[in-house]
Image (spheres, rainbow, N blue to C red):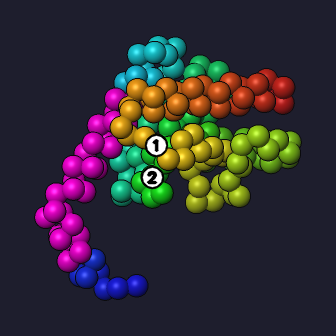
Amino acid sequence: MEPFHQYIDEYKQQMEKGTIPKAYRGLLEYVMSLKTHIQSKHPDFFVSGSLYTGYMDMTYFSCMPKSLKERHLKIAVVLIHHPLRFEVWLGGYNKQAQAQYWKLFKESGWNQYNLVPTTQGYDAILEHVLVEEPDFGNLDVLTSQIESGTLKFIEDVESFLRKNV
C-alpha cells in the first residue's frame, strides 16, 4: 500500500480534471431521483428521508413495505461504486433483528438470493444484484429495471416469511 500522501496527490490530479466530481454528483442525483420515484409510485412504502453516501464505496436508501417494517426488516436499494452496479439488500432495523432473520434464512436452506456469510461486518441479510452493468444513457429504463427487480425481491422475501414465520 502506498503512503497516504501519494493517494492525495492522485486525488488532487483527478479532481482537477473535473470528471470524477461531475460523475459522482450525477450518480447521487440519479439515486435521489430513484428514491423519489419509489416514494411517489409506492406511497404505502416507508422510504428513508436521506441518502447514505458512504465513502465513495456505496450509496443507498431504504424503503419498507408495511409487512417488512412490522418484522423490523428493511430493504436497501444500493449503488455499489466499484464495480458500478445496483443491488438490493434485505437488512434488519438493528443487529438483533438482523441476526434473528439471518438464522431463519440460513436454517431454512432457502437459496433464492445470496445469504451473507455472517452478520458480523455486513449490513445485509440477503443481497441480490439488480443491474450488473447499468446504462446511464437511458435512465427511464434503468429506473424501471431497478424498481421491478426490487419489487420482485420484496415479493419473494414476503412470500418466504409468510410460509416460514
- State which tag comes first along the sequence, 2 or 1: 2
Query: Over which residues does the magenta segment extend?
Result: 8-34
Q: Is residue 31 at all visible to an observer of this figure?
A: yes
Q: Residue 129: image x %, image y %? A: 59, 45
In-front residue for pair 138/84: 138
Q: Quadrant of the C terminus?
A: top right
Residue 12: within the magenta?
yes
Element carrying mark 1: loop
- Left of 27 or right of it: where is 16? left
Of the 4 image quadrants, the one containing the N terminus is bottom left
Residue receiving disc 1 = 134
Which residue type carries mark 2?
A: Leu
Seen at 76% across and 25% down, the residue is 159
> Farthest residue in the front direction?
137
- Secondary structure, mark 2, is loop
Image point 21% across, 66% down: which residue? 14
- The reply to whether dot 2 and dot 1 touch (C-beta < 8 Å) is yes
Left or right of 104 in this view: 35: left
Report x, y in % for residue 72: 62, 32
